[in-house]
Amino acid sequence: RGLTDLFFQEMSFFGEITEAYKSHHIINDFLFPGSSKTAYGWDTFKQDELICLSTGGADNLIIPCLLLRGRSARPSKDGEEKRHQHASTLLIYCHANSEDLGSIYPCAQWLCQMMGVHVLVPEYPGYGLCTGNPCEDTVNRAVLAACTFAKDALRWDLDHILIYGRSIGTGPALNAARLGRVGGLVLVSPYTNIRDIIETHVGSVIALIAAGASDWDNRSMIRNVAVPILLIHGTADDIIPCNHSEELHELCQAPKRLVLLERVGHQDMDLLYALVHASPDMFPLLDLPRAIDLSTVAPLISGSKGPTAVPVFNLSNLDDPAQASPWGSNAGEMFIGGRNVFVL
């Protein structure tokens, strides 16, 4: 790490690297391969499981998001767990590389059921049905849009918004946490920064070529996180070694817990079991049950032909106090993917 760190220090002499340069760096083609084949369409999921968020502005992003409603498990008088009330916590799920909303649907549904949480999964630009150039900036914007939707549109209590990042997704998740956009953070198989991974696998020379590419510096960001953090890593991970989690855990100043799983690799299901097992001790999962009802934040489209329309929430309206209520009167229609969608 010494050689690449020294190189980046020397580069700072020439001025700050711009987001435009970073977004078109050749290394991004390797960092963000996207899903090899889109695993879902506009009519793949059940009604109200797919929504879209619009960031607005000249560089507007239309971000498909998976939205799953959860039920919490509470013990009954006979000692059995019964899922009879709405979940308390909204989990924002930042998926790994080479995945999209379709391929991670079973995993998101499993977490929804096993943790007893609502789940919101933003798509990354360049992945699935989300158009755009995938890079650190656009992926961060997509994840922050999901955070804005949770807090300012759904009016979710911040302490009950939990963000979960896995692998490449730990970067945008950590970024949201350091900005104070969530109440808790879960990092599964995180990295210190992208350059460290590149140097581990292909050496310092290629890591130098990556100068200026997208690079979530988790080592720096975690120092500015104030919310509880749960880190989970397998000791047999040959993609991101577990010493990345150990270093991040040591640097973290917030309430924290590190779970290392012996003989567990980068993709193993045991990582998710550990998440389900450890989360109740770290985060408030049961104390504030609340339903997610999209009819309170968007008019329903009636009389549309074909599959049910996918609602699009224009988050730029939230910046205007006069339009702070996303179920206001300035509604219109647009077409995405050949389907009617609603823009607020």
Image (cartoon, rainbow, N blue to C red):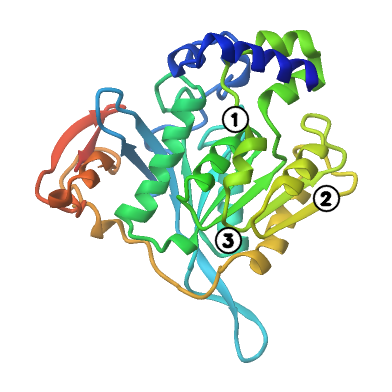
- Residue 52 in the figure: left or right of residue 133: left
In x, y percent, where is residue 106? 59, 46
Q: Nearer the viewer, mark 1 or mark 3?
A: 1
- Residue 128 in the figure: left or right of residue 308: right
Measured along the vertical axis of the image, is residue 125 above or below residue 255?
above
Amino acid under label 2?
Answer: Leu
Q: Residue 64 occupies which quadrant of the picture?
A: top left
Of labels 2 and 1, earlier in sequence is 1
Q: Nearer the viewer, mark 2 or mark 1?
A: 1
Judged from the image, the secondary structure of the residue bearing numbered disc 3 is: helix
Q: How many angstroms separate mark 3 from mark 2 (CA)?
A: 24 Å
Which disc is residue 216 wearing? 1
CA neighbours of label 3 inside 10 A, class few (<14), some (14 to 19), many (20+):
many
Q: Residue at label 2? A: 260
Judged from the image, the secondary structure of the residue bearing numbered disc 2 is: strand
Q: Residue at label 3? A: 113
Q: Residue 69 occupies which quadrant of the picture?
A: bottom left
List the single residue furthest toward the front: 13
Judged from the image, the secondary structure of the residue bearing numbered disc 1 is: loop
Q: Quadrant of the N terminus?
A: top right
> What residue is drawn where x is 42% and y is 47%?
147
In x, y percent, where is residue 63? 38, 34
Work out whether residue 212 or residue 290 is closer to the camera in this orientation and state it. Answer: 212
In x, y percent, where is residue 331? 13, 43
List the single residue furthest toward the left: 329
Amino acid under label 1?
Answer: Trp
Q: Quadrant of the C terminus?
A: top left
